[in-house]
Amino acid sequence: MLLAPLATLGRGFSADAVLLHLSGSVMNLSANQEAPLPPTGTIVALAWATLAMMVATLVGALRRQNWFWITGLIGSVLAVTAVVTLGNSIDEQTARVMADSALRPGAKRQLRNYYASAGMNLGLFLPVLAGLIAAGAGLSARDWWWQTFNRMRGLLVPTAAIGLAILVGALVVLIVQPAVNQSGAALSLWSGWLAKADMVYFVYSTLFAPLTALNPLLDSLKLATPLIFTGLSVAFAFRTGLFNIGAPGQLTMGAIGAMLVGVYAPASLGWALLPLSVLAAALGGALWGAIPGILKARFGSSEVINTIMLNYVASAIFIFMIGNDKFPFLGREYSLPFKAEGFEPRSQELQEAAQLRPLLSVLNVGQNGAVAVSIGLLVATAAFFGLRLALRRQKNRSLIAAAAALILGALTWQIGIPVSVTGSQLNGAFLIALVCAALFGLLMWRTATGYALRAVGLSPKAAEYGGISVARGTILAMTIAGMFAGLAGTHYVNGGALDEYRLKGNMPVNVGFDGIAVALMGQSTPAGVVAASVLFGTIDTGGIDVDQKLDTINRDIVTVLKALIVLFIAAGGFLSRRVTDPPPPALLASAKAGPGAPSLDGTSAAHLERSTPLPNVGQNPEHHRDGDK
Amino acid sequence: MNLLEQLFTTAFLVTFIRSVVPLLLTALGGLFSERSGVVNIALDGLIIFGALAGAVSTKLLEPSLGAAAPWVGWLAGMLVGGLIAWIHAVVSIKYRANQVISGTAINLLATGVPAVLLTALYGVSNESPKVENALPLWGIGDLKFSPPVYFAFLAVAAAWYVMYRTPYGLRLRATGEQPGAAASMGVNVRRMRYSAVILSGVLAGTAGVFLSIGNLDSYVRNISAGGGFIALAALIFGQWKPLGVLAATLLFGLLQAMSITLDGQNLLPSTLVQALPYLITIIALIFTGRSRAPKALGTPYDG
């Protein structure tokens, strides 16, 4: 807290800030030196109290006292109070400026933006975090808390990996980004450090900012959509013990399939055009996934290598199809119908009936241009989960809940809540992605096929012995994984995510590789994949903002963060095995009780299985067959 | 006939050799890593890091070192390649991570780090400024190549000698086949694997240096153009043997050179010719399966 700025009192457009330090001193680096600043006395006092609590917590923790979680919690609350107070005084200041009739409207707007980006800084954020961690650690001495914590153990490695990645990223920002100083005054070593620390906070707060407002959040969901598809694809293969690096190629083939049907199918098909086009995307991806599946099952060739090779083959087909409208073959020129007129590589436009409309225009029930989002979806979702929980005893509760949800959703479809959203490009592919996530969960954990696939993933030998065909499982898993990745093509082609309803040369196929990161972050569960995709979509959106505001840090920092997350998850977050993967309590108890004690019960075995997101992926099959000699 | 005339020219030979060299160096690197039992999917990323380090350090040292700068740049490329490979080694050997995931992480890093670094240094994210002193060209007449070309062909011979005629090579192969047996004979499995992975980074880094300051005179985004993956394919097609690797890279290099020369000709669509190495690899894998791969490839050693 002593080393970092406490709060930002105002910030200009190019990230130039007015910083408040714990000592009460204010450092103005912004271009606007005259802007009036909110009062800071209360905040500084609260911050000192927080610091005292933090010191007490540290002393308590070092002496292994039981009370240190209380001081941690109080410190956290104090820091939050300081943040809220700060927010209030900034709001008052903004209101005062807005009411000031002596100012021009342009200057007012500028000042409003100036205050809008003010708020807490590292000096307040870190104590909130530290206090909560201390409270969490202190409470773990209590049994109920420990058990809750144990249930969430799967989140431990991703969380540690994100934390480490953010730390390394912060170092990069510290080294690379010079302090933004528009005040004209020279910086001493100390104020230079403060300004640099502020840059770290600024970069991260901008990256995660899309989570806090509706419009950017919708943009994040748009960027998250293809990640959900490719993440599900990689995760599905992971669960079956396969590594699908082929998502980029499968996505490409899916997009080509969607384009072929969307452009060239007869228009007389009418509304069926859209489902057929989506189906074609699924088929294209499934085909490209099935090839390495069959090759692995039949000839034992590694799916890792084959999917990489097929990525390049798909990209060659892609460029061949839409890069040029004619091609030479043995001295003659043949023409290709796919490329549209013009310099840019892109296909013809999709027929209107094959386009997925923006989600907002689908959900909008407002009249006369007003935007009012239908609450039907929300009601249906709430009804489904509520009823499922309420009817816990009922055997086919899911069915009843789904039926009720459908009826309620249809009834409430015409009721809308007005929202202020402008031009969001989030399209129907997002809903398809959510459906895919649900399908993934149903198929993997609620059907016999899913059981067989998981068995193949956990132990091919045991599965084979149990009468499950490993070859069939491999082919099936790769086909379905390919299908998920292929459906991502609908986002770009049918959904018009690249501003046009066409197959375009600038389709970012690399989201296929991001799918690996997403699947790892989400621990290969559908809910985890969706959450991780939204997180990645958020920092992708925030990265664009960072790009605009700073010269030396650009959105590639986001790529670096993603790569670091993958690296750290691969290394298990550098956590000890005893922390991440402890022996189940039942096993410990039975070991302690000696022979004759009850053996592992079903629940903890199921828990163990869930916590193995990467069963034997990439292992040499020969090695398994020979056994460990 | 027109085509044959096109193919039997010195210009084509130069293109051919230039296509072969990065593949050959990288595949030799992959050979060491995979014969020790560590899958190295990171090769493509290692090329990029090597290329970046070569170009940037040459540019930085040029004012003071002059014509000696690219040689130091080469050294820097090898060092950085080795360093990044060391990260792969630590994560996959010490922390027993899944080697494919760890390699993927390195490849992802290679798409982000160069852009961040170049923006910080020069304010542009996709290329480094041109260097004045690239690596010199040695040779006679029109057949002039930069030193890494000669290094690459010497490296094949050296790799063969090391692999089959030295104790290190014997231990390395044992480590990749039966790490347990090797360990019981007193071989330090982890140290063997570390050395092999780092060596693969040094070789792939050299390939990158050749691309950035041997072939061109600056680093450009995606300079490897998937060469690391073709090299991986060549490694498999060459059955994890030095001479096989040489033959495979010659074939794939020939295909690449042909697709470059064919561009603008009216014989075959060049985009499809570019895809041939990948298709050939898939077909080759059908016939060989994994039968010739090192037995312990991809399995962390727990001893």
Image (cartoon, coloured by chain):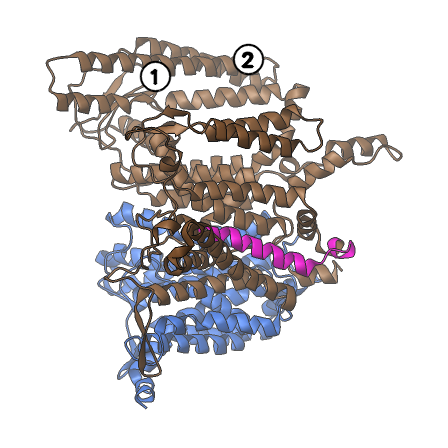
Residue under the point 21% across and 57% down: B63
Which chain is blue in the picture?
B
The residue tagged with tag 1: helix, strand or loop?
loop
Where is the N terminus of chain B found, in terms of image quarters? bottom left
The residue singled out by tag 2 in the image is: A70
Q: Amino acid at mark 1?
A: Leu
Q: Which residues are magenta?
A: A463-488
From the top left corner, tell me how far across and down residue A450 is, in percent: 66, 48
From the top left corner, tell me how far across and down residue A431 is, in percent: 46, 40
- Between B250 and A50, the one lying in front of the other is B250
Please indicate, yes or no, whether residue A222 appears anywhere in the rendered image: yes
Magenta stretch mostly in which secondary structure? helix
* B187 falls in the magenta region: no
Residue under the point 35% across and 45% down: A556
Image vertical order of residue A92 relative to residue A567, above or below: above
Which chain is brown in the picture?
A
Whether marks 2 and 1 lie on the same chain: yes
* A466 falls in the magenta region: yes
Farthest residue to the bottom: give it.
B1
Q: Chain of mark 2?
A: A
Disc number placed over residue A22 in the picture, else none: 1
